[in-house]
Image (cartoon, rainbow, N blue to C red):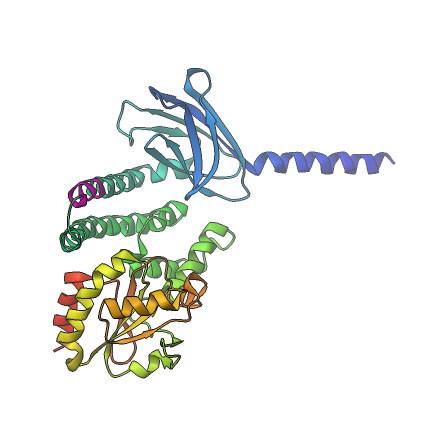
Amino acid sequence: MNKAIFLVVGFAGLMFSCQNKEQFTIEGNIENPGNIKVISLYEGDNKLDSMFFGDNNKFQFVRPASQSRLLSLRVGKNRYDLIASPGETISFKADMHQDVNAYQVEGSVLSKTIQPFAKERNHRDYVQDSLQGVFSKLTASSTADEIEKLRAEYKSKFADELRSYTAKAVDFSNQHNDLAGFYAISTLDPEVAESEIIAYADKIKDEFTENRYVTQFKEETQKLKKMAIGQPAPELISFTPSNKEVKLSSFKGKYTLVDFWASWCMPCRQENPNLVRLYAMYHNKGFDILSVSFDDNPGSWMRAIEDDKLSWTHVSDLKAWSSPVVVDYRVKALPTSYVLDPNGIIIAKNLRGAELESFLKKTIK
């Protein structure tokens, strides 16, 4: 009996010990918060918790954790990235009157490791927000053509920033073969850093196998890889307004723009005159367009085709965002487009306006 009691007590003690280790604590204070009264804890874009500041603007978050987690504290517009591991008590301190990168963190080796790169991320976000602010002001009273021209200019400016940021992220990940390196790569934009993300996922395919965040990254990268530049586009079978079946594979032998759009999508409709012009210029030279509509109303779809004078092939299953092409072609917003070579291989993505014209001019001789 005594031995049985000892085993029960021993097991209970073990459970209590494991529970303590399978959580993390983030505590500290934010100086000079001004009118800001709340601090929030995020994992990606998901808010995990938030609280009002206590005395002396102190805070504390205690959360379960069976593995290391990529997190951020949000205070007003400021973002502070951390990596919290099971059993850690992280001490954090920041001053809202100081630069956002001048925070202090103790109790977490990985959080201190990513601090220099978190500065790069904050700079990238600042540049993006600044450019977006200026763009919004300039386009407030602009015409559609002027907006498209400005969009191309600002996209080019931000693309330069993203290329520099991507190089820094890859360099940082090469120096840190741990979750700090993973953190840097996880902040990259797949639109710009597709090849770098795929290369990193291949590099760590047998590493961090028990970390679900890394596992999710690998799974998403496999989906990205299927639609990467250099990959064959998956077969697409749909129906014209007259219910004729069309296969994407029937377009082989031509450079083909697969254009995902909808009658209700204003950026799509604004791009249509450019597509009409480029189709007229290059169709006889081996260029074609297959437009795939996300409409669910056949009347609206057919009226838009007629009103915009779109003379190429149009298809739709009229399932809108429930269509299988959403998953097959990773369509997350409209417009989305892919340019295929005569063999059906993806050679470019999401080109519009002057970018598309320049690409066709260089590609189709």
Q: Is residue 78 left or right of residue 148?
A: right
How many discs mark residues in the rendered view?
Answer: 0
Q: Which residues are magenta?
A: 132-140
> Residue 247's quadrant in the figure?
bottom left
Q: Residue furthest top?
A: 55
Q: Is residue 227 visible?
A: no
- Of the 4 image quadrants, the one containing the C terminus is bottom left
**Residue 87 in the image, given as x and y percentages of width and height:** 53, 35
> Residue 46's quadrant in the figure?
top left
Residue at x 25% of width, y 84% of height: 253
In terms of secondary structure, what is the magenta stretch mainly? helix
Seen from the viewer's position, the closer of residues 232 and 304 is 304
Q: Is residue 141 magenta?
A: no
Q: Is residue 15 left or right of residue 273?
A: right
**Residue 152 in the image, given as x and y percentages of width and height:** 16, 54
- Of the 4 image quadrants, the one containing the N terminus is top right
Q: Is residue 302 above or below residue 166?
A: below
Residue at x 15% of width, y 73% of height: 363
**Residue 156 in the image, given as x and y percentages of width and height:** 16, 53
Residue at x 29% of width, y 42% of height: 121
**Residue 352 in the image, given as x and y percentages of width and height:** 21, 62
Residue at x 15% of width, y 48% of height: 142
Q: Is residue 137 magenta?
A: yes
Q: Is residue 354 visible?
A: yes
> Residue 19's quadrant in the figure?
top right
Seen from the viewer's position, the closer of residues 272 and 156 is 272
Q: Is residue 155 left or right of residue 11?
A: left
